[in-house]
Every structure is written in structure tokens, then in C-alpha cells.
Amino acid sequence: MAFCVNATAQTIGGRVVNNKGITLEGVSVTLRTSDDRPVAFCNTNEDGTFSIEMPQSETAEHLVFSMIGYAKRCVALNNFKPGQDVVLENDAFMLKEVKVKAEKIRRSGDTLTYSVAAFMQKQDRSIADVIAKMPGLSVSPSGQIKYQGKAINKFYIEGADLLGGKYALASENIKANQVKNVQVLEDHQPIKALKKVKFSDQAALNIVLKDDAKNVWQSVVEAGLGASLQGKAQLLRDAQLLEMLFSKSKQSISMYKTNNTGKDIGHETIDYTAAKASLNADNPLIESVTISTPSISDQRYNFNDTHVFATNWLFKTAKDNDLRLQVNGLIDKTNMTGHTRKTYLDAGTTGVSVTEDEALNEKTNEWSAELTYKVNKDNHYFANVAKGYIGFNRSRGEAMLNHAPILQRANRDKKVLSDNFEWIKTLSNNNTFSIKSRFLYNELPSSLLLVNGSTERISQQKIEWDASTGFRHKLLGMYITYNIGAAYKRQKMRLDNFYTSLNATYTQAQVYVMPSLSYISPSLRLNAGLSGELLYRKYGDESKPTFHLEPFVFANYRLTSRWSADMLFSHALSPNAFSSYIEAPVFTNYYSLIQGKAQLNTTTTNMLSNTWKYNDVIRGLFGNLGLSYSRTSNLPLYESVFEDGF
């Protein structure tokens, strides 16, 4: 598009081509006086044409045409014919050597771009090492990345979501010298169909690779061997095999790691966003055998034997269509020993001491798989995520409690199947229609060796499903949303210990309607709603229906491009956990038990958890400054019991 300054009067136009007759776009055209002073200028259009105006107060003598790679040409106005072609000749020249200094941080709209070269130091190996040095970003010891104190919601590599929430596989294995930039996408809405109608206060990260790290298979093989110098001699190892590919149509990271040096490598398969995306699976009531650990790095006292397997594949089946497969495995053996001494003081006494000498052996074997198909277009979003998990945990312990030997045994198995479906369609005027469905099956068989030599056995099962549909439309500059949904949950538990045997079933069903409104402007983002919920619960022969309202308000005001203020208010009522209704004693480890206190026929105040939260935070690029107030009211659900001679 031609761009001109100085207006009115005579208009001069023509076309610029090269010596082969090909039109040239972006040629600088300058109208100059006899003393070579510029009085007007413009650039040629896509078709090589230009149009420049002669100011009334000026008298020009010639036109000057210039473009990198071509010789400059000067044409006298008295020789120029309107509409004529001006031919530029190719001209090769040498550029002077210049030193380019990378800009550390630059902003473009809601995107911050960090130059890796500006933050990387010689000792940095992975890109996670560099990210931890970037202002506003932090990396926890477990690998989770946060921006301005909030966990990121996506981790992209060249704009593709290869790993979902398991991004530590990439951040801790992609070499720092293979990355050009790290981009922070502020207030990132990962669903394109909702970008203009639903905002997010979380950021996403995008890793921009160097050209030589793209479209090629990369292999990394590292191995280290040694021997322990303390205690019994032991062969130590730390090895990894890594294969990576990042191309436009396909991405892959496959890995095998093993070590027995105390280093934690299992966290690389943790999913940091699973709880937000799907229903939550229960955990066994029986705890693993544990011992007290010192407040130092676990690598200093942990004796492990760990193997981690992972393969991740992303295929671009079409534009904005992704098919992703993830398979992860962890096999771990851990040995620890410890000694603790506790003194219980009472008024007027010298206290009672309890000493424990402990040894722990724990074996974990867990595998998970995920298959995701996603279509993410500006007016259409479809995603289906199917997951499976199976895990076995065996922990064995030996303890000397006040010089009395105690054997500890705990078996904890876990099986989970889940499926999450979501479909969003953008209609005319940015109205949207959506359907969501989530399903989960959870099975938890476990057993525990008790102090008296008997075994407690627990079998837990859960089936949970919910579905909702929503419609969003625009009214008076705001988006109004109507959501209608239903949910069902059924939990079973079979318990057998020397105290009692029981079979318990808990059923929960609910129907809800939630109208809400949202407003988005460059400086203000507002979201408020009111949910009306009919809840039905049944445990044994008792049942209870209830109806309640849950209001919420969230506001974000952007003071500048780097500072903003947030406010959140919510009032929520939540049913007690299934285990809180079970009045039979349940041993969770060899010396303590829990026993439910809640009753279905108690008042709403006693049986529900009420939460009021007000949060006012000023958030900036280089840190957080905030004030917060929260009040939570909960009914105590459990009691712990410790007695000698169980």
C-alpha cells in the first residue's frame, strides 16, 4: 500500500519494474527539489505502482527511486511521463560488518519475547535453566513454570501443544543453545473460538527454536558410571536416551532415563494441568509407609533405582487439527532409613519420649496413556481426550517403637479410565454454543498390615459423569452466558479390619443452571455469575435434597501494559467427602485411624463448606505486590487416635 506525506496539488504516478519487467513492491519514491531537499515521498504498491502528490508551496525538480539490491535512479520531472514504467537495475554491494546486540525483552501487544542469548550463561544446559532467570518467570524444583506467580496454562513448542501439562519433558531436555526466544503469551485463551468472548488470567509459554533445531531428528545419549564411597560399595549410574523431532507436520519427544544416585527424574512425567481439565480421581485411604525426612535435598539421603519411559507424538492431520498420543511409564525402587525422637510435654511433668528407628523399602510401577484429537479453529472447537492409568505401589517398613519391633506393609493399587469431550461452535455475531461431557472410572484396591498382625483390606470404586450445554450471546456490549448441566457420582467402599466389616455406597446427583455475564475491554475484564443448584445425596437409608445459590465476581483492571489489579469474590457450598460419612474406624497407617462424623440429616451449615474470598493483587512484570483476605468455614470431619497395643 502506498504511503505518502504532504498533501494536495499535482499528482504524479507510474510503475516501477526490474530489468526483467517484474514489478517491484516497496520501492522508495522521493520527490526532491533542485538542492536535493525531499518534499514528498511514498512506497510502491504490490503491483509496483505509485502515486505521489506535489505540495502547492513547493517546486520539485526530480524523482528518486531506491531499493536495497537495486541501483538508485533519478528521473527529471520534465522527462517523466504520467503512468510510465521506471526500470531499476540490479546492484550488488557489500554491507559493512556490524555487531548485533540482542534485545533482552520486547513487547508486542500481549506477547513478551525474551531473548535466550541475553539470559543464558555457560552453565545453563536446558531451557528450564534459562527460563528460571527471566524476570516474571519461575521454575519450581518439580518443574512447574509460573508467570507472575500463576501457573502457565499451556506450553507450546513452535506454536504446537505436544505435551499438554507434561511440559517438564521438554523444558528440562531441550538444550538452551537450541532455543532462540521464549515467548510469554499473557492472558492466553487457548481456545480460538473463545478469544473474543471469554478471557483468561493465565499466561502461556511458546518456545521458538533456532533453524538448525527444526525438521531434523535429534538424538542424545548420555551415560555416567561411578561407585559410592560411603557404606557398602554400590555401582552408581545416571543415563538417558532421547529422540526429538520438531517439524511443521509432526513433533515428537521420546525418552528413557535411569539413575540410582538419588536424583528425582520421575517429576518429568507429572501433568501440571490435569486437575483443571478433567474430573479428579480419588486416592487410596491407606497411606504409603513413610519415614521422617530431613529438611535438605532428597538427593542427599535418598537411595533410589528409577526408570522413566516416555513417548509423545503430535501429528498435524490438517490445518488447526491435531492428533496427539502420549505414553509414560515409571518404575522406581526407593530405600531410606531414619531415626526420630518425640517428647510430649504436659504441665507439671518431665514429658514422655517416643523414639522410632525406621527402614523403608518402596516399589512403584505406574503407566499412563493419553489419546487426544483436537480441532481448534476461529469458529469451531472440538476436543476429545481419552486417558488411562494403572499403578501399583508396594511399601515395606520396619520400625523399633520404644524398642518394640513393628512391621509395616501397605499395598496401594490404582486404576483410572476417563474421557473428556468438548465442542464449541461460534455462531453469527460471535455468539457461541457449547456441549461438554466428562466421565471417570476409578478403582482402588489396597491393604494394610496392622500392629496386631491382622490385615485391613479396602476396596474403593467411583463412577463420575457430568455434562453441560451453554449458549453465549452479546447484549449491550457484554456477553451473556446460560449454562445448564447435570452430574452424577456413585462411590462404593468395602472395608474389612479387626474392628468391623462393611459395604457402603454413596450417591450424589445434581442439576444446575448458571447465568453469567462477561465484559472485555482493553483495560477492564469482568466476569460475574450466579449458579442455582439442586443437589441430591444418599448414603445408606438416608437421603437429602438441597437447593443453594453460588455467586461469584472476578474483575481485572489493567493499569498499564505491565501492571494490573485483580479482585475475586466467591461463595461456594461443597458436599463433604464420601469418607466423612463412614462412621466405622478406618486405619490409614499402622498407628492412626480416621472416623467420619458428618450426617446427611445435619443442618446445611454443618454439612457444607462455606468459603468467602477477597483477593486484591497488583501484578507486575518484575514481581508481585498484593493484599488478600480469606475466610473459610469447615466442619471437622475426622479424628485421629493413637493407642498402645492395637
Image (cartoon, rainbow, N blue to C red):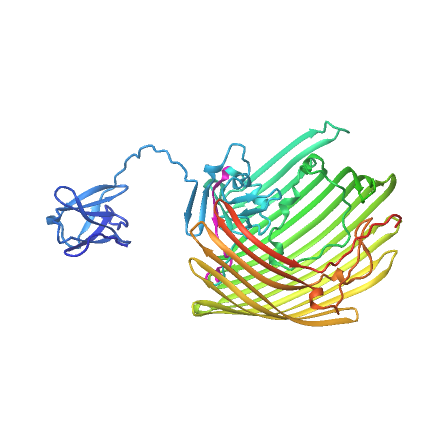
Quadrant the N terminus occupies: bottom left
Horizontal arrangement in the rendering, residue 447 relative to residue 215 (left or right)? right
Residue 350 in sight: yes
Residue 189 image point, x, y percent? 50, 57
Judge by depth and name the residue closer to the eye, 424 or 318: 424
Q: Taking 504 as reference, is 48 left or right?
A: left
Q: Residue at x 66, y 35 (%)?
A: 238
Q: Is residue 223 above or below residue 147?
A: above
Image position of 482 with respect to 195: above or below: below
Residue range highlighted in magenta:
177-196
**For residue 440, what is the image quadrant?**
bottom right
Q: Is residue 202 visible?
A: no
Residue at left offset 59%, top offset 57%: 372
Query: Which residue ends up furthest to the front in the rendered image?
Result: 348
Question: Residue 241, how many percent across, how many down?
Answer: 62, 39
* 25 and 615: which is toward the camera: 615
Q: Is residue 240 left or right of residue 53?
A: right
The residue furthest left is: 78
The image quadrant of residue 49 is bottom left
**Residue 425 pos. (x, y %):** 50, 66
- Residue drawn at x 41%, y 38% is 102
Image position, residue 548 (x, y; %): 63, 70
User: Which of these two is toward me, 442 or 590?
Assistant: 590
Who is closer to the viewer here, 640 or 17? 640
Indicate yes or no whether the magenta region holds residue 567. no
Q: Residue at x 61, y 65 (%)?
A: 437
